[in-house]
Amino acid sequence: MPSHLLEGKTAIVTGASSGIGRAIAEHMGLAGAHVFLSGRTESSMVESKTLITQAGGQATVITADVRDVAQVRGLIASAVAETNRLDIMVNNAGLSYPASILEGEPEEWRSMLETNILALLVGCQAAVKAMRACQSEGHIVNISSVAAQRRNSGVYGSTKHAVNSISSTLRDELEEDTIRVTNVMPGAIATNFARNFDPEFVQTMAKMAGMEIELSKGDRLPPEALETLAGKMKSLLGNPNDVAKAVMYAVTQPIEVNIADIVVRPPKSMTVPH
């Protein structure tokens, strides 16, 4: 249901074409924020924009590749140019290639480092400058992972350990500002995040939910399949809306409340490839 919790605020969400990012963007748009959805799949972001605008909200779609520093900075500049402010920056874009270190591909490592760490750093830096310029009571939300709670979580987990460190460091740097930093660590969530995993792993999960699906590495599950997974595997897979609700809780607190870290995970933990 539409609300007015974020009325008058400008929010940016990266990785908003699907999964957690899409859910966060829709929740913020329905709460009254002018939300800027950024991602690489325009069609799904347009669907989210339609949902938001039909409910009386405001949304802008900007296709971008966050691995390009100029595009990240341009995204923030576009939001400020259109609304004259920035209040919320959600650095959600991320990806995983779960191969072992011994068998991994350096270009896949580079993609994870540029998406999960560099883009987030650039987004944080540019967002703080924009928030300071408009003197907003701003909020930066960095989407990490429960993988950052394990020391042996592979290259992907290493990028999320970095996110946790960046969030904590930035929080210290902003103690004298009216800008808060929240670090969110989702567990296993029913999204297309696992598209780069071994197809056999994904197909096994689908079979546990009563579905027979043929997949190749990199294929995305259709939305209806994800809904079935989320509905039938609640003990093992969380819903993207659960993470979005946690983010909404953090960004709607008064400025004197500092929500540092949030873990959102299903009841049972699941051992996934590193």
Image (cartoon, rainbow, N blue to C red):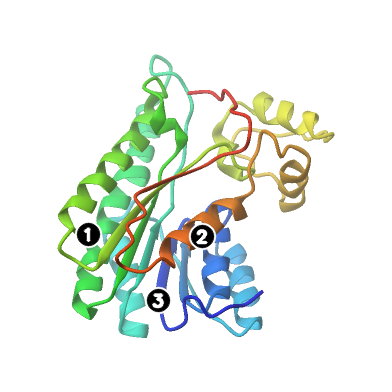
Q: Tell me, yes or no, whether the two marked residues, 3 and 1, touch with CB atoms within 8 Å.
A: no
Q: Residue 107 occupies which quadrant of the picture?
A: top left
Label 1: which secondary element? helix
* Residue 156 visible at all: no
**135 relative to 110, above or below:** below
* Rendered position, 143 above or below 237: below
Residue sitting nearer the eye, 184 or 77 = 184
Q: Which mark is residue 16?
A: 2
Q: Which residue is mark 1?
A: 125
Going by the numbered disc 2, the residue's amino acid type is Ala
In percent of width and height, residue 122 lies at 25, 55
Where is residue 256 drawn, in percent x and y? 29, 65
Which image quarter is the N terminus in?
Answer: bottom right
Q: Earlier in the sequence, mark 1 or mark 2?
A: 2
* Residue holding disc 3: 10
Q: Position of residue 143 (x, y in %)?
A: 42, 48
Q: Of helix, strand and loop, which one carries label 3?
A: strand
Task: Tell me if I can see residue 29 in this picture.
Answer: yes
